[in-house]
Image (tube, grey):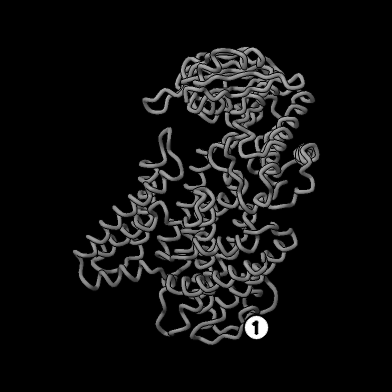
Amino acid sequence: MSNVVVQDLSVRAGTKVLISGVSLDIEPGTWCTVIGPNGAGKTTLVETVAGIRRASSGTVSISGRRLEDMSERERARVVALVPQHPEVPAGMTVADYVSLGRTAYHGLLRAPSAHDRAVVDSVLERLSLREFADRDVITLSGGERQRMVLGRALAQSTMVIVLDEPITGLDLRHQIELLDLLKSEVAECGLTVVATLHDLTLAGQFADRLVLLDAGKVVLDAPASEVIRSDELAHSYGMDLRVVDVDGSDVVVPVRSLRH
Amino acid sequence: MSSNPPTARRVALVSALTLVGLVAAVVCGLAIGPTSIATAKIIGDVVSHVGIGHSSLSPLQSTVIWQLRAPRLVLGLLAGAMLAVAGGTYQGVFRNPLADPYLLGVAAGAGLGATFAIVDIGGGLNTPTWTPLLAFAGAMVAVAFTWGVGGRGLHSNAATLILAGVAVSALLTSMQTFLQQQSSSNSIARVYIWLLGSLASASWRSVWLVFPYVILCTAICVLSGRALDVMSVGEDESRSLGLPVRRVRFIVIAASSLGTAAIVSAVGLIGFVGIIVPHIVRLLVGTSYRRILPISVVFGAAFLVFADTLARTVMAPSELPLGVVTAAIGAPVFVIILSLRRRMVR
């Protein structure tokens, strides 16, 4: 079980400040979702937590080790990323794509070991990708493709998984299916999840904790049910929001102001 | 491109056919030429060198085979293998199907070095020492300059490096053109002959000069196949998967460029092999660089020897420029395979 500690993190692009002074302490086994309006810095934050973007100042540590002190290979064994717009290389099979997740284990000169292959087989099985294993990745539907990208991340066998808008472009059923799948992996393997989501209802339903980000700063960091009912949330999005109880689940509904 | 990635059986078949092609190319390279020598006699002579049977070649025939055709054949094999694998490696590391081994300024730098050697040192002659030496130095300086401009720094990426290569190539080509403009028509003709590439001046000395570079650099390129497959998902994702992208990029670009520079210094600028061979192989065995690169080595070697055999026989006793022949054969072959592949996919 790994905890993620973000300390006074700032990221700049040229002179533009993307995020500033962000501090988080995410307990092992927690699902933490970062929400906020467009341009709030959500992607910047999770990409920095995943180690593919450099911090201008501050640190990100996982299980007490700072990401900047790790090699790429060490980092890939600690944290996996499901990017917002994954590259899907035409001509590669689904099994080979998922196997990319084992790169940090077998290295670049050796073929995957029996253990690597067993991990990939298990992921294909758990994510119901077995029937597509030999198919070209570009022939998959959007939902199947996202499952495959999640499979690659799970094949990294990390205790922390970072997802940037993993349900973008999926229909409602596939959105829920993917998040349910992830939830079961979290429960089974004790994964720590750091995700971004635009859908506030799903963010509230699946996360243990929500971090509201606005203009690169943390506005609120609290349990999900508390954040979705907060005034800060409505203020950050610049509109009225209502939380409706539907069969015991919170549903966030935007209210179109009469002023408009 | 394909809904079904190639099966292991197809890859094995293509590999076997490519090896057969290589053997055929070696036989053609040794057996075809102005002096008619029976293939059986050549084979008998070759095996006699490993202690089996006796050679029936005359001393003159033996000289033709071992001092003229064999070094030319071996240099052709080395050049074809290196250019093809370097092209495939560049296409992988830059994720750009138009990449070839000359992308980062090797051709422009070598061209400038060779032109300087021919025009200013050789007094209009292609000297066997200075031309390859300055071509090699020019190629390596050009790549180092490109890397210095576009490959370093926090935000460098493949696109920056390609743009730097375009800029450096343009600068060096303009300098080469200036040198040519200042020289005599005799020098210009020599420079053009060099620029079009040829194996005519091949000797065992030139073979041994490039041999270590080609073996080492080809090995590094082939071994980089797995890394290039990972890089097919982009730089950020590759890094998140544990690939040290910058280090890998530096190593494979250095190996491809060094090997290409060595070959170019010996045979001039042979175009088309580096871009067309990896594409043909990709159409046959799929997109994995673990398959493309080793098969390109063999395919490129065979392809260039066949092209050279044509170049020196079609208009014998004069020779066609090798670069013209590689393009004249490569383009139609590529189009035929492309159309066959499309038909198979449908």
Mark 1 burial class by Cα count in 10 Å: few <14, some 14-19, many 20+:
few
Q: Quadrant of the N terminus of chain B?
A: bottom right
The answer to whether residue B84 is above or below residue B60 is above
Quadrant in the picture for residue A82? top right
Residue A11, visible in the rendered structure? yes
Chain of the residue where label 1 is placed in the rendered structure = B
Quarter of the view holding residue A87: top right
Residue B253 falls left or right of residue B283? left
Q: Is residue A8 above or below residue B34?
A: above
Whether residue A254 sits left or right of residue A149 in the image: it is left
Q: Which residue is mark 1?
A: B40
Secondary structure of the residue carrying tag 1 is: helix
Q: Position of residue A141 (x, y in %)?
A: 68, 47
Q: Residue at x 66, y 74 (%)?
A: B47
Residue at x 41%, y 51% (from the top left corner):
B104
Residue pushed farthest left?
A: B182
Q: Give the total number of marks visible in the rendering.
A: 1
Query: Is B10 left, or right, of B139 in this rendering?
Result: right
Residue A247 image position (x, y, % from top left): 77, 21
Residue A255 is situated, as x and y percent measured from the top left of the image, at 57, 23
On the question of residue A74 being in view, the answer is: no
Closer-to-camera residue (A98/B110): A98
Q: Which residue is depicted at the point 67% across and 22% down? A: A251
Q: Nearer the viewer, residue A221 or A233?
A: A233
Asked if A43 appears above or below B145 in the picture, the reply is above
Which kind of residue does numbered mark 1 sit on? Ala
